[in-house]
Image: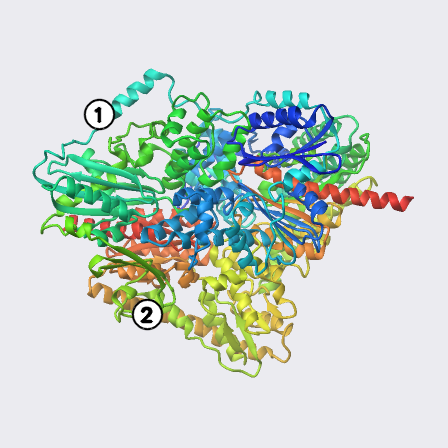
């Protein structure tokens, strides 16, 4: 008999074959991380019921089986390799295998040169990801599948990792998008992620096999793959067991089952994971800790007997809805804290109905709403004020600690922290989309281990050896946890370890402090996650300071909203009456806005009385129905229009294509002029779009490179599709020297991305892909060197022609910059005349691309400010000493702009940062410190293929709120 | 005690007085090479100490004091420094740090600034940081790089490369376990002793030493058997520093592989050659070209001595010369690609595949910018050039777990073993 054991990240699969290679036993179950027990149980069962004393050969496979196999000296075969063995045996004519597991995604190319690919350490789009999404949607998996079958529209969901996708899905839910569309969109995202991440330029075609749990159990997921691959794959019999079968087939050495069982049982003893000191030494320490925090209570009142004005505060968070009814003395009369189950509207309606019916005498004098669902709820229920989260939290924190100087709020999905300076919100830290984990991560983990979040968290309080899990993105922690379990960590240790990493993530990744002094000593912590005593304890220990946690920690947003409503209450409240609530209707329509290039997916909510609310829009056009205000002060729009004005001019030397991405967003005037002068017709690729990106995504070799670089693949392919025979995209180590820095490099990606395109785009075969190294920084040498390059590709271009064309190109480039600066100055003057705040939206030239900036420029103008680009002001200063090596041309502009803004009271800087931009890890800190030297607020916005603007709005609105407060303070 | 002096930009200088009083801490990267480097500096009058602290506290200190999105090597190098400074072993008013600065377009040129920021945050502003660079980036009155030091360093590199390459070729097959490492230790001690006496740095002595090294290693008793041969390439720090790559070489050895880690000399030649390539590609001064050329020629001469010495023993695979490696990559990627490891990384993969080490681990820090291009970006192309290439890219960062990394490496090894068996079977069939 041959036994194959596949111990995966979430499940354990087993197959036993008899001597005729027939399956005589098979099993598939979740192991809930109790790996050794399950293995022992399983083998014991097989020994009793299947083997009947016969000798057996055993091989272990799977990611979680590796260490155990080694330690117990059992034969091991790597799981992808096992899959291949099984496929060779069962379906030998297979071309490609796609296998999704709990945390792994794999593609095996079998025909035409075998290759095997596994996802890297950035592991989105796997079974665990789908599980997370199901939890978020509050749906069982089979229902998710059934719903997906009825989809009408596919939304774009970033599929790189679970956290990203979550922040895409949440706003969709809050805007009222259909669950069926979301389910189908999740599956499409998984398919895209797998293909983009693993195909890496190789075409998936021929006989395609789908293996593993998710693809077996979810036919709609298979359909998503079929659509993405334009093929029909098959899901064979035993698709769950291929790894186990492969292990069984490769079993040759007989093993002593009893010996193996003994070894496995003994394996637990070798605990060797990294751990930190326990959270509490003893019960007494915990009791005094509890006592200290119990003293921080909000006043309470009895709603039934209350007579007086009442104020309603609602906080529609990412995973929960909170509401507080508050009396005139800021006493809490009533509150709710509920999971939003994907749609906050019915929850709030039920609650309001209940209040109005039960307490007809209660009069609401005012109301306010905050959180993700702010606009939707405000429109749905006639709530008086909508305020940004940070303001709500600050307002609430002040009622507990009037001179608070730091507030940290960890909710289910996001983390908000800010410093208070001179009574105003100063420095905002939000978790970027890559580290959102927070509370919902703890929740998901508790669920996978079969606990409720409360029980799970309490387990950690007295853990003896809390696991040290590190402080990176929480998604990565799954495998750290796995490893710790393997090494014998108990659930208690893991619970404590997870609390520690949530806190460390907050402190070192989001806020990035080295000591508590940097934050001040008066800290208020809040948000649902801090109700967890373990998290609170870790935070105090890590920061070395006692903090204030109000007993209504989870309700602080709603409480703050209520306090805000009270302070602004004037006219009678517009909150819906009982009759209106009873007649309440809510319909949702989904459509695409066609008023500009962003093509926003709009969700149109229609309420009773034909009140409408449009969600998903980036600007006011679909709301006001006007296509653009005439007086919009937006340099991003102006620059983009300028670039688009470089049209092809027919020429005798034929067409030459230029992909519009990365540095071409600044050098187009240069190259367009140069080639046009030489008699080429310069054709550019169209503006980026989702379709263009998807077209090229299978040729992207590195899935962690920045999004602007990834887009280049689609741009080059679109030129090939246009039939252009020569494409020009040069490598450039150096950029123009603007004398602002110590050197004038391009970043490595901008400098050399053409090499990646050349090496991975098979469609370029037979075409002229001109990607030589050019140095435009040496104006004198450039024409000669460039002539040499051109002569490799074209006949009969004289050196003199190149020289003249180059002269014109330099002139055009400098002329273009000049036009930009002059127009920018004009806009600044206009803004000053109109008393508009001026935002210097600072990034790289390619952040002009609407697909990259997601319309953030428009969002800012819609908030009433002027948008100016960094290059307009960067030449107002001379080179100055920085704390970093100032060696990249584009980045030198950022420092210069920051320096200049320090001298301008009505200007503020917002920095756009592409996710994965390694260089910005350096520039952001420096820009911040330059601004802070001049008492300016630093605002950073991280962008990716992600289209959720929720977090962006919070940042911007908080910035404007802070500026307003500053102004009020001044007056 | 030495007075703290600052330059015009406000940078704390390493003064001549400090040279006498201060201990200079040097971070670890390549254990053999760096042990030799330290003695070169001691020979030149600097009190240098090589840091050997290891363990999780390095990562913790790094995470605490360095921007977490910065590359992993920066986090580790700075973490190692801070961990050492916090250990209480050093008088903080008599300690300086040294770190290399390449001046390339990669983030690595900024490590020194990140280190200063970290020192500032840790409240250790009084500690001077010395930049070790050949680009004239930062200078210090108490520290200068002259021709003599350069010559000695070059010798140390050649010795280090030889000891590393030869021990890697012998260790997997040695009959008596530990014999190879003993010899490495013996030779490292011998060379350090020579350096301290001011010996072993001239071309002639180098030749003698290298020949003797080759002879000694060839004399190790071995039992040859077919083993999977694995090459390691990658970002320089993660490729070489054992605690950065989770002790990759040890792991591969435990999986019964022979490991080949390309040496440091080609990287140095590459960095020198870049200056000439820049002038060829974009234009520039002939005089500068001639100066660089002279250095390049000296290094090439040194490499030839090294190559000949290893070739003197027929049992060794001779590491490829810079010239050969450079030729291999022509037409695959441009010579202008110079940031980080640049085209050299691609070239090393091609060279390893050619030399029979076609199973390759490409080690890089998570999100390493140049590696998007010259590592992961070129795998497709390398396979087109040499279909035997079996490459697995592995990302390293503070949270990447060993389990995940080893699982991926094991997959690569499973394919490698199958190929090896096939090859052996073919060989056997032929001899029949």
Outermost residue toward the left in this view:
A307
Outermost residue toward the right in this view:
B432
Name the disc covering residue A295, or none: 1
Q: Chain of mark 1?
A: A
B365 or A137, nearer to the observer: A137
Q: Answer with left or right where residue A325 lies relative to residue A865.
A: left
The way the protein has been coloured in the rendering is: rainbow
Q: Answer with left or right where residue B173 lies relative to residue A238.
A: right
Question: Image point 29% across, 27% down: which residue?
Answer: A546
Q: Position of residue B370 (x, y in %)?
A: 55, 52
Task: Check disc 1: other Cα within 10 Å, few if <14, some if 14-19, many if 20+.
Answer: few
Q: Position of residue B52 (x, y in %)?
A: 57, 29
Q: Answer with left or right where residue B197 lies relative to residue A143.
A: right
Q: Chain of mark 2?
A: A
Pair 2/1: label in front: 1
Is residue A907 visible in the rendered structure shown here? yes
Name the disc covering residue A822, or none: 2
Element at badge 1?
Answer: loop
| Location of residue A150 by image quarter | bottom left
């Amino acid at each position: 008999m041959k036994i194959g054991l596949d111990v995966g990240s979430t499940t354990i699969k087993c197959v036993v074959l008899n001597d005729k290679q027939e399956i005589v036993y098979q099993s598939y179950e979740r192991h809930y991380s109790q790996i050794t027990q399950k293995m022992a149980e399983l083998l014991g069962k097989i020994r009793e019921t299947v083997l009947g004393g016969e000798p057996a050969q055993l091989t272990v496979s799977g990611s979680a089986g590796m260490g155990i196999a080694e330690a117990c000296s059992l034969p091991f075969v790597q799981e992808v390799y096992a899959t291949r063995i099984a496929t060779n045996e069962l379906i030998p004519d297979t071309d490609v295998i796609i296998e999704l597991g709990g945390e792994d995604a794999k593609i095996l190319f079998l025909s035409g040169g075998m290759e095997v690919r596994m996802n890297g350490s950035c592991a989105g789009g796997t079974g665990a990801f789908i599980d997370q999404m199901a939890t978020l949607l509050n749906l069982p998996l089979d229902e998710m599948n059934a719903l997906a079958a009825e989809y009408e529209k596919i939304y774009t969901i970033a599929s790189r990792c679970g956290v990203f996708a979550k922040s895409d899905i949440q706003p969709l839910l809050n805007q009222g998008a259909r669950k069926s569309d979301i389910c189908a969109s999740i599956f499409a995202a998984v398919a895209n992620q797998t293909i983009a991440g693993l195909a890496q330029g190789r075409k998936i075609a021929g006989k395609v096999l789908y293996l593993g749990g998710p693809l077996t159990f979810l036919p709609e997921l298979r359909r998503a793959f079929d659509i993405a691959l334009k093929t029909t794959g098959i899901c064979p019999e035993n698709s769950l067991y291929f790894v186990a079968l492969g292990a069984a087939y490769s079993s040759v050495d007989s093993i002593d089952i009893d010996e193996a069982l003994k070894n496995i049982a003994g394996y637990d003893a070798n605990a060797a994971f990294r751990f930190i000191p326990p959270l509490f030494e003893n019960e007494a320490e915990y009791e005094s800790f509890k006592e200290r925090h119990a003293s921080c209570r909000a006043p309470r009142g009895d709603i039934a007997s209350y007579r007086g004005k009442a104020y309603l505060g609602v906080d529609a968070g990412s995973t929960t809805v909170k509401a507080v009814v508050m009396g005139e003395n800021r006493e809490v009369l009533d509150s709710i804290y509920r999971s939003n189950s994907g749609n906050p509207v019915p929850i709030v309606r039920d609650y309001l109905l209940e209040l109005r019916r039960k307490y007809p005498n209660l009069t609401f004098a005012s109301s306010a709403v905050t959180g993700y669902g702010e606009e939707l709820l405000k429109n749905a229920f006639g709530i008086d004020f909508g305020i940004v989260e940070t303001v709500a939290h600050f307002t609430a924190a002040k009622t507990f600690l009037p001179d608070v100087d730091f507030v940290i709020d960890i909710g289910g999905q996001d983390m908000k922290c800010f410093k208070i300076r001179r009574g105003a919100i100063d420095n905002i830290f939000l978790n970027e989309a890559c580290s959102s984990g927070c509370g919902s991560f703890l929740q998901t983990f508790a669920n996978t281990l079969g606990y409720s979040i409360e029980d799970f968290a309490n387990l950690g309080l007295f853990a003896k050896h809390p696991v040290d899990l590190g402080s990176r993105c929480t998604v990565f922690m799954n495998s750290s946890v796995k490893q710790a379990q393997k090494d014998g960590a108990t659930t208690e240790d893991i619970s404590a370890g997870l609390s520690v990493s949530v806190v460390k993530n907050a402190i070192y990744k989001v806020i990035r402090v080295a000591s508590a002094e940097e934050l001040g000593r008066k800290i208020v912590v809040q948000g649902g996650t801090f109700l967890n005593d373990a998290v609170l304890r870790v935070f105090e220990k890590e920061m070395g300071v006692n903090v204030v946690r109000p007993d209504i920690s989870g309700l602080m947003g709603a409480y703050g909203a209520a306090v805000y409503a009270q302070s602004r209450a004037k006219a009678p409240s517009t909150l819906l009456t009982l009759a209106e609530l009873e007649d309440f209707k809510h319909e949702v329509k989904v459509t695409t806005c066609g008023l500009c290039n962003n093509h926003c997916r709009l969700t149109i909510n229609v309420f009773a009385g034909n009140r409408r609310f449009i969600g998903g829009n980036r600007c006011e056009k679909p709301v006001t129905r006007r296509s653009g205000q005439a007086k919009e002060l937006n340099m991003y729009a102006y620059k983009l229009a300028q670039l688009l004005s470089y049209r092809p001019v027919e020429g005798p030397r034929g067409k030459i294509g230029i992909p519009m991405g990365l540095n071409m967003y600044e050098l187009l005037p240069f190259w367009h002029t140069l080639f046009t002068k030489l008699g080429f017709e310069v054709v550019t690729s169209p503006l980026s779009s989702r379709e263009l990106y998807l077209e090229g995504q299978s040729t992207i070799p590195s899935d962690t490179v920045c999004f602007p670089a990834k887009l280049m693949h689609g741009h080059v392919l679109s030129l090939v599709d246009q039939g252009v025979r020569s494409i020009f995209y040069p490598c450039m180590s150096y950029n123009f020297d603007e004398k602002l820095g110590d050197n004038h490099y391009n970043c490595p990606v901008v400098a050399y991305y053409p090499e990646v395109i050349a090496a991975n785009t098979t469609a370029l075969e037979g075409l002229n892909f001109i990607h030589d190294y050019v140095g435009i920084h040496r104006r004198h040498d450039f024409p000669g060197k460039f002539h040499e390059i051109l002569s490799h590709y074209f006949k009969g271009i004289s050196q003199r022609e190149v020289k003249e064309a180059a002269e014109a190109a330099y002139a055009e480039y400098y002329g273009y910059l000049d036009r930009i600066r002059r127009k920018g100055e004009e806009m600044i003057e206009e803004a000053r005349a109109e008393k508009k705040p001026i935002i210097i939206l600072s990034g790289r030239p390619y952040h002009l691309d609407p697909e990259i900036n997601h319309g953030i420029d428009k969002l800012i103008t819609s908030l009433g400010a002027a948008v100016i680009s960094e290059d307009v002001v960067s030449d107002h200063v001379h080179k100055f000493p920085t704390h970093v090596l100032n060696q990249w041309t584009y980045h030198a502009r950022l420092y210069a702009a920051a320096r200049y803004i320090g001298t301008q009271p009505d200007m503020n800087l917002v920095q756009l940062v592409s996710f994965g931009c390694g260089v910005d890890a350096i520039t952001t800190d420096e820009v911040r410190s330059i601004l802070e030297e001049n008492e300016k607020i630093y605002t950073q916005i991280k962008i990716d293929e992600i289209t959720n603007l929720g977090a962006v709005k919070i940042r911007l609105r908080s910035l404007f709120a802070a500026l307003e407060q500053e102004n009020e303070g001044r007056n | 005690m030495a007075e703290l002096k600052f330059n015009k930009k406000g940078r704390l200088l390493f003064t001549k007085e400090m040279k006498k009083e201060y201990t200079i801490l040097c971070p670890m990267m390549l254990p053999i090479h760096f042990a030799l480097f330290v003695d070169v500096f001691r020979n030149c009058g600097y009190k240098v100490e090589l840091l050997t602290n290891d363990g999780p506290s390095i990562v913790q200190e790094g995470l605490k004091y360095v921007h977490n999105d910065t590359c992993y090597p920066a986090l580790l190098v700075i973490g190692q420094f801070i961990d050492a400074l916090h250990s209480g072993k050093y008088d903080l008013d008599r300690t300086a740090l040294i770190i290399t600065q390449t001046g390339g377009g990669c983030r690595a040129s900024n490590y020194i600034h990140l280190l200063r920021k970290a020192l500032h945050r840790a409240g250790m502003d009084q500690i001077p940081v010395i930049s070790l660079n050949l680009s004239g980036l930062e200078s210090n009155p108490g520290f200068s790089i002259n021709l003599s030091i350069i010559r000695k360093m070059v010798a140390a590199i050649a010795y280090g490369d030889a000891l590393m390459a030869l021990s890697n070729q012998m260790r997997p097959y040695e009959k008596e376990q530990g014999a190879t490492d003993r010899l490495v230790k013996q030779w490292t001690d011998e060379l350090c002793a020579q350096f301290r006496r001011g010996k072993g740095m001239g071309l002639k002595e180098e030749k003698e030493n290298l020949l003797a090294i080759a002879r000694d290693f060839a004399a190790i008793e071995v039992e040859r058997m077919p083993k999977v041969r694995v090459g390691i390439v990658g970002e320089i720090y993660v490729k070489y520093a054992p605690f950065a790559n989770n002790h990759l070489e040890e792991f591969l050895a435990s999986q019964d592989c022979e490991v080949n880690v390309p040496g440091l000399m080609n990287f140095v030649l590459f960095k020198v050659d870049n200056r000439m390539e820049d002038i060829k590609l974009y234009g520039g001064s002939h005089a500068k070209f001639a100066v660089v050329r002279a250095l390049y020629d000296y290094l090439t001469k040194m490499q030839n001595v090294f190559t000949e010495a290893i070739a003197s023993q027929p049992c060794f695979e001779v590491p490829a010369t810079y010239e050969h490696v450079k030729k291999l990559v022509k037409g695959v990627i441009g010579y202008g690609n110079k940031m980080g490891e640049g085209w050299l990384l691609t070239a090393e993969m091609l060279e390893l595949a050619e030399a029979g080490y076609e199973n390759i681990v490409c080690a890089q820090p998570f999100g390493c910018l140049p590696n998007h291009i010259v590592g992961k970006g070129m795998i497709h192309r390398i396979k087109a050039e040499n279909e035997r290439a079996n490459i697995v890219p592995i990302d390293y960062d503070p949270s990447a777990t060993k389990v995940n990394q080893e699982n991926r490496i094991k997959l690569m090894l499973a394919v490698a073993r199958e190929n090896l068996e096939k090859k052996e079977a073919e060989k056997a069939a032929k001899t029949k």
